[in-house]
Amino acid sequence: MRRRQVLQLLAGTILAAPGAATAQTASKVFRLGTLSPGAPIDEKSPTGSILLKELEQRGYTLGKNMTLEVRAAAGQVNKLASLVQGMKADQIDAVVITGFPTALACKVAKVPTVVALGAGDPVATHLIDSLPRPGGTITGISDNAVTLSTKRLDIIKQAVPKLQRVAMLWNRDDLGMSMRYESSAAAARSLGVSVQPLGVREPDDFNGVFEAMDRQPPDAILMVADSLTVLNRKRVYDYAGVHHIPALYEYDFFVREGGLMSYGPDVKESFQRAADLVARIFGGARPGDLPFEEPTRYPLVINLKTAKATGIELPANFVALADEVIE
Amino acid sequence: MKADVGHSGGSSGSADRGSSRDSASGKSILGSRLFIKYVALFVSVVVLALVANGAFEVWFSFQEQKAALTNLQHQQAEAAADKIEEFVTQIQSQLGWTTQLPWTNGTLDQRRFDALRLLRQVPAITELAQIDASGHEQLKVSRLTMDVVGSGIDYSDKPEFKEAMKNKVYYGPVYFRRESEPYMTIALAGARVENGVSIAQVNLKLIWDVVSGIKVGENGHAYVVDGDGRLIAHPDISLVLRNTDMSKLAQVQAARAGGSGEDVQEAEDLAGHKVLTAHAQVHPLGWFVFVETPIEEAYAPLYRSVQRSGYVLFGALLLAFIAGAFLARRMVVPIQALRAGAARIGAGDLGQRIDIETGDEVEALANQFNEMAGRLQESYADLEKKVEDRTADLTEALAQQTATSEVLRVISSSPGELEPVFHAILANATRICEAKFGVMHLHKDGQIKCVAELGAPAVFAEFLRHVGWHRPQAGSFLERVLQTKRTEGVVHDGDEKIGELPAPPIRLGGARTLVGVPMVKEGELVGAIVIYRQEVRPFTEKQIALVENFAAQAVIAIENARLLSELRESLAQQTATSDVLRVISSSPGDLKPVFESILDNATRICQAEFGTIYRYDSTLFHMEASHGEPTELLEFRKQRGAFRPPSGQPLDRMLRTNGVVHSMDDAAEPVISPAAQLGGARSHLAVPMFKEGALVGAITIYRTEVRPFADKQIELVKSFAAQAVIAIENTRLLTELRQRTEDLTQSLNELRTAQDRLVQTEKLASLGQLTAGIAHEIKNPLNFVNNFSSVSVELIDELQQELAKVKVDAAARAEIDELAETLKGNLDKIVQHGKRADSIVKNMLLHSRSGSGEHRPVDVNALVEESLNLAYHGARAEKQGFNITLDRAFDPAAGEADLYPQEVTRVLLNLISNGFYAAHKRKTLGDGSDFEPKLSAATKDLGDRVEITIRDNGTGIPLEVKEKMFNPFFTTKPAGEGTGLGLSISHDIIVKQHAGTIGVDTEPGKFTEFRIVLPRNGAALGNTGGRA
């Protein structure tokens, strides 16, 4: 009967309206990559876990709608280019990286890249066009590393008021590192402190570094973080501990695993911001349109446990200024 | 059927009546109009109420929702503004700690420590500078760079110092470090002037926490812009880092213009999405906090409410429909029962009673219907009886009408035929009148004749056939009818008699009752119809009226038939006439087909067997055409040829009477005509043909039976005779016309020729004058030449005589004599040729002299010789290297002839020139053989005539040219070499001027010979005026 059909049709349209609004879009699985010049950034690493946790808060869960490709050069910087090409071949949606050489390799390969840490000043190194509009395929967190190096000397001076000579460990092959060294050396002179440059190129060079410090013991050690130094950090902790030399590192995680002090951008914050940028790239934004951000927090972290174990006395005023004290 | 409609009101009652009236045919309840109307009304009332209610609800909840959301957002914005204010105030109060000490040397370390602590406590401060009371920087502590002590940088002119010193506190404008990170400067002066000023660079990204903490619904968010409309804080930090300018947005503009915050509620965000917006001001800084929610989200509850209203509406609709359907059904069922009952009553089922027990108006209505049905049933029976009576009457009338119409149909379908009409009339009359038989009589001059009978007993029918035309018995029934011309009816009771014997119908046909109806046309009796019954039963009025009607129809039919036959006859005659006229017009000048056509038509129309047309030339008759005559008769007529009719024969009688001869029976005539004798003609008709009162011919037609020709037929033949005369006259006129036309054409042609010749002659005459002038001029010098050369001869003689006197030796003498002789010889030659030239010039003068001159006796041979010379020299002068052999064969007896010498010379010159041309042409065309061009001229004495022959051995003349060669302007020479006038003029000169003849004999490729024969006194005979 016609009337019945009309009524059915009428009911159908009324009931169908809300259904149409809740239509589901097909879920895509995103491919996240991490690339480190040193140790891999995976779900077990401190930085990796921060990254994944932040991404999960933004709706990207590993194993559900996201996969993770972890690559690391283990200090062999020349392997980075081929690693990046491999990631590109895997059609990674975004790569989170650390360090300037890695960023450079990613820029060359034109992979969507988020620099989390340690790439120095990206404008000065011509990694990007400008902070508000990077252009290219790279965005991330800037690192005021050059000026920070001088600030670090200032902090060492506060920690060791009678500071005369400070040893600087850095990778000679890393352009970003060399720039840091040079500005630090200039700052040191203004403080009346001499810098003992200890550049390394390969792990074996560390023996030479330690020998040099044996010959001319420094009042403090400033270790510039890069793949090589990071990979050999434990030896530095040990040497500094054995020789009661106060050492300042760049990131707090050094201190958490036995280093004495650190001053630098908040790693957690950096990876949180990096996760945010990754999420936006997943959401369809082009990295070149996402402004480079600067860190807001620069925590001073002191491991009093290490101090006590190695018998290093730090001025009370200095300790009072620390943002975080590990006891 | 039982139904209860207790609650039906007045309005529904009226609808019931409408429904029962409208729908007589049965319909389902659901399909009935009333049902649909009722349900529709019910549903629409419910839906209207619900829709109005829903619309009000939606409208008000929309307003409330909007107000509530705006209010909420406004509150959140206010809260955020408070928080940002607090953020700034906190920084300000923390800064206050650093300005508590006055600037003295000992306080530097303490101050530095305080500064570092401040940095630790307030993460937003990136850099802190401390300025002493004189405006010089004493200390700068930064998170990123080394601390600077005592740089002494002069701040005294900078706004942060000046403003802070003046107002205690200074809020700098927002600036973007490295074009990216938003910062602002906050400067605070100490409680006392000497405490100096602390200037802090505050990282505004820290406000992000405040802003991103604000959530309105799913996608609502907050952001902060500074007094210039630039974005300071936004959940999407990228926008801030990109230094986004928000001042274009309507809501930002409104806020900056100082609106209360309620001005703009709906606006667009940066991406152009519609948002619901609210804002609050951060007071000390002049910033604005905006809280915005996408409009779809803000109004989502509203949409859900509308949706719910829809569900309710639909449910209510369904319920209203069910309830409406139920109530309508309660109403409609009894109404339909009522309607069905009414429909049955309407269909004639008057015994039906409607059974409704609803106890209301519907039941009362049903009862009224029942009562009405009962009344109807009663009156119906009454009506039926009346109808039966009428039907019987109608059937009878119909039968009569059918009979009448049948008779009329027969009349119309048989035009001109009376037999079937009479039969139809009788058949219908007897049938309708229930008579045994009927008879139809025609009446003429008091006599009657039976023309049709139907169903009559055999004896009576036989009697009717035999009796034929007869006068009805006196005193008989029929006689009465004929006399009174009125309808008479008689009923016999068996023994009634008319006269001694019973009338034949009674006696022979056993008629007992009869009615007779006269057929009268314009008061004249035409006939009568009588119908008979064999039993005694009078005819009804109606039956008699019918028979009268039939009688009238019979009269009409008879009249029709008569008119039709007349029409046909007249048509046939007209056709015949027009046929003859057509033949006349289509055969002008030819009489035979005309006569044949006339005769054919005349015999046919007049129903004659054969006929003849004669022409009369005032003495004899000539047979011109014959039609259908027996062979014997035709042979006789042909052998006879033109004849004078023997006395007493029809044509003879016609000659004598000058009128039509009409013989009833030729066999009874005193003189037996050949037609009667050989063709068996009995009746004949001879019609004369007159032209202006004179007999020019006759038409005779014959019948082989004795049957006189009708007057009309005679008239027709007369008319044919007149037409024949016209045709003869036409032919004569036509022949004359043709002759005249031919004559005229000939004259015209001659005139044209004459005109053409005149033109050419004028041309030639002018040429002749020219030649004459020239010849005259040449003649004078020639005279000198001739005279002086003659004188010179004499002078040489004298010279010789004088020389003879001189003594010279013999040798010289011989030499001188020889020279003198030679000179004399030369001079003689000059004289001789001068004479010749003189002769030529003389001839030219002679020839070119205008006019024909006088005719005189001329020596023919000399004339020919002269012409020959003149032509030869002319040809040689005209063409270099011309040569031809001339033969002369002059008859010494040719003697003299009287002619115009110039004219004849012209003819000869022309013929000779043509001969030269032809011979020379043959040579130039020649195949290279040793052809010798030759022309011979000959004269011959023919007694009183003389013959001149010019013959050449040239190309000859083709036959087609020969035919036309004497025509003016005909020429075979190429354009410019001949005028074409030569032979034409020659012909005229010889034939017309000299009464001679000119002829040509030729064979193409061999020779041409012209022969001129001139009478010796031709010029006197000829037409001298023919030529100028």
Image (cartoon, coloured by chain):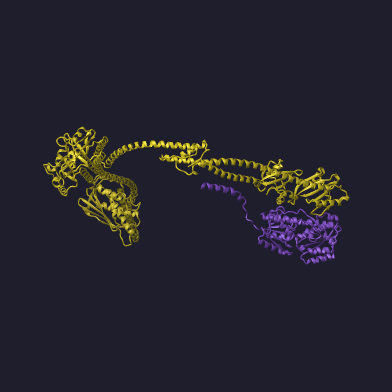
Q: Colour of chain A?
A: purple
Q: Position of residue B841 (x, y in %)?
A: 32, 50
User: Is residue B886 visible in this depiction of the protein?
Assistant: no
Q: Which of the pair A248/B436 is nearer the observer?
A: B436
Q: Which of the pair A119/B836 is nearer the observer?
A: A119
Q: Which of the pair A95/B79 is nearer the observer?
A: B79
Quarter of the image for residue B823 reads bottom left
Q: Position of residue B644 (x, y in %)?
A: 14, 43
Q: Position of residue B832 (x, y in %)?
A: 31, 54
Q: Position of residue B917 (x, y in %)?
A: 32, 55
In the image, taking residue B815 as reference, residue B437 lies left or right, namely left
Which of the image's four quarters has the C terminus of chain A?
Answer: bottom right
In the image, taking residue B270 as reference, residue B1008 lies left or right, namely left
User: Is residue B443 visible in this depiction of the protein?
Assistant: yes
Chain identifier for the yellow-coloured part of the image: B
Outermost left residue: B670
In the image, taking residue A135 as reference, residue B590 lies left or right, namely left
Up the image or down, B8 lies above or below B987; here it is above
Q: Which of the pair B720/B829 is nearer the observer?
A: B720
